[in-house]
Image (cartoon, rainbow, N blue to C red):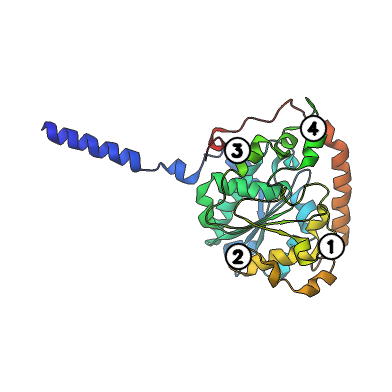
Amino acid sequence: MAKFVLATLFTALVSALITVPASAASGPVLQEPTSSLSQALSCSADVSSPAKTPVILVHGTFTTPEETWRWGYQRALRTAGYPVCTVQLPHRAEIDMQVSVEYVVHAIRSVYSSAERKVSVIGHSQGGGLIPWALRFWPDLAAEVDDAIALSGPQDGTRLANGVCVPGRCPDVAHQLSAGSKWMRALVREPLDGVAFTSIGSYSDEVVFPAPTATRFPGATDIFVQDVCPDRLVGHLGMLSDAVAYALVADALTHAGPAMPARVAASTCFATDLPGLDQAGRARLLNTAVAAAGAFYSLPCTPSEPPLRDYALAG
């Protein structure tokens, strides 16, 4: 009888040690209200019966999905036959990115569930940094994502944030976007597993710099528009309309694995904008950017970066 009890206890102990809890397999529990997460996601009607891989668009700091995507990428991708979803990050993505990233996690899971197939995710600026963070710390997402693509995503931070942050006068998001921040060190601590990640930057980006390190992610395919067209000048907001950047995105979406500059036609260098661009929409984004720059120091400021949540301290 004693031997039986010992054997039973031993079996239970081994089982407990080798069994991975569901929460560990799917990542940390989301803290944001489910209703808020769901309301932030907007999709085209064909996402539940897609003929092509659905694409989720994630905007950057100080903007909205409409300001960032509707006049350019959203139009071009819809014309190309892709179901498109957008995520509205809270407070125009001006807050702690550990809050904002939960909206990306929820969006990927929701669209994958609706489409019953893998999705692709494209992010600009902060949005391009939230995507790999979501994939790093919510491991279930890797099986749900085909392509992850960042346009001017600050994978190693940006020196611009370091420059505007003075002691006691810096918003949380700027602390986190600074080169060398705790957020950035946690983000690049390990490469991504199981996802084709293309990070597209520009040597003339005046917001996310210095190149090439600012947009570089370990294990990703790091590309610059100048790899295709050496003398091309593309700024931070210009990445949202540039024909070469879009050609690289389209290449990733239409091939297995990440984008390859060699597959982009040389004639693309003679094009300026992505197909179907709405000039009025682009002008509105530029006006928004000017207003955001002026309102930067009106944001709540803290003396230091928000502490990393427990899940990001290791792994």
Local crowd size for mark 2, using a 10 Å CA cut-off: few (<14), some (14–19), many (≥20) = many
Mark 3 or mark 1: name the one nearer the start of the chain. Answer: 3
Q: Which residue is mark 2?
A: 53
Which residue does the image show at 85% across and 59% down from the upper left?
A: 233
Marks 3 and 1: which is nearer the front? Answer: 1
Residue 1, given in percent of the width and then of the height, sits at 10, 33
Residue 99 in view in this figure:
no
The CA distance from mark 1 to mark 2 is: 30 Å
Local crowd size for mark 1, using a 10 Å CA cut-off: few (<14), some (14–19), many (≥20) = some
In-image side of 9 versus 71 (left or right): left
Mark 2 or mark 3: name the one nearer the start of the chain. Answer: 3
Mark 3 or mark 4: name the one nearer the start of the chain. Answer: 3
Local crowd size for mark 3, using a 10 Å CA cut-off: few (<14), some (14–19), many (≥20) = few
Q: Which residue is mark 3?
A: 32
Q: Amino acid at mark 3?
A: Glu
Q: Which residue is mark 4?
A: 165
Q: Which residue is mark 1?
A: 232
Q: Evaluate if marks 3 and 4 touch, with contact meaning CB atoms under 8 Å apart.
A: no
Q: Would you place residue 119 above or below residue 310 in this image? A: below
Marks 1 and 2: which is nearer the front? Answer: 1
Marks 3 and 4: which is nearer the front? Answer: 4
